[in-house]
Amino acid sequence: MSAKILSFGEILWDIYPNEKHLGGASLNFAAHLAKFGHRVDMLSALGADSLGEEARAQLRDWNLGDRFVPALAGRETGACLVTLDENSIPSYNLLKDVAYDCISCEGIREDFDLLYFGTLALRSEYNFASLTELLKQKSFGEIFVDMNIRPPFYSEKTVRFAVSRATVLKISDEELPTVARLLGTKETEPRAFAAHLAKAFSNLRCIIITLGGEGAYALSCEDEKGAFCPAKKVSVKSTVGAGDSFGAAFVSEYLSGKDLLSCLQTASAVAGFVVSQTAAVPDYKPADLL
């Protein structure tokens, strides 16, 4: 089943000393979901610059809609400057006040089966207000939230907003303690935490907690049934984009009505392939991995 997806959030370049790669959680998620045959539109912004032109060309190569991605004069395309120390340990400088910090939700008239967003794009008050208004004006079949905690670009306000709007919520085990603290609970065991959220937030239908190399757990909030799937054992080259690919594959199966274990198994297979590659969005056909 092909679904209509709207992915709200960052489009940015990871710029290393000698190379650059296009990414951002919302873009990676969208690119992977498009590989499953869904119609995916980005809701973001680029700068009116050369990096913006390159990014737009890549969006089209990935079969992503860019009609809600304006080029903003006076704003630079998003970027994260990556520097390496003498031991090749990276440090990251996510540039602020860039194009994706000014995402307009005006002009969204049609219906979508699913809206995606994470907390990084909510770091600007403009985006927070813009997305809040969109959610007041339109309803979506599902709202998939990947927490995507990136210090220091999160707050209790944005985390609580994200959890209270999601129907499907994805949190990593690394993010869980931070989210638990901001939500005022000391419960950090993954299954118990998921059960706590299900009771505390009636909007939630499904909660996914990824557990790194151990696998992932999902809970159906309506019937309180959970499922666990171990991670694929592969030789890891890069974990960049792995969580985004996991979320996209899970969503594709979830929207088609598959049970939680099937969703997790497909997501695990896709993420396992992605971490065995260097690119965040490598070339593949989902059917070849399943």
Image (cartoon, rainbow, N blue to C red):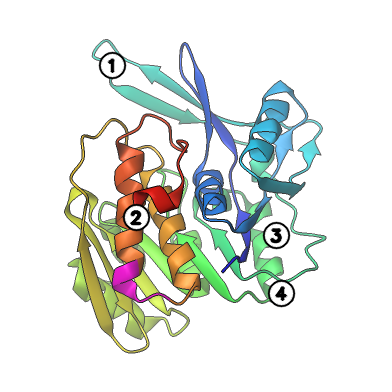
Q: Is residue 187 visible?
A: no
Mark 1 is on which residue type?
Answer: Ser
Which residue matches tag 2?
Answer: 290
- CA–CA distance in space, label 1 to label 4: 46 Å
Measured Cα–Cα span from mark 1 to mark 2: 35 Å
Start-end of magenta stretch: 258-262
The answer to whether one can see residue 263 in this image is yes
Residue that appears at 71% across and 74% down: 138
Drawn side of residue 84 relative to residue 50, left or right: left
Pinpoint residue 109: horizontal percent, then vertical percent.
80, 68
Q: Which of marks 3 and 4 is in front?
A: 4
Residue ID for mark 1:
88
Q: Which of marks 1 and 4 is nearer the N terminus?
A: 1
Q: Residue 206 carries which label?
A: none
CB under 8 Å between discs 1 and 2: no
Residue 29 lies, with reference to residue 240, above or below; the image says: below
Residue type, label 2: Leu
Query: Nearer the observer, disc 1 or disc 2?
Result: 2
Q: Residue 130 carries which label?
A: 3
- Kindly indicate whether the residue at mark 4 contacts the one at mark 3 (C-beta within 8 angstroms): no
What residue is pinned by disc 4? Answer: 138
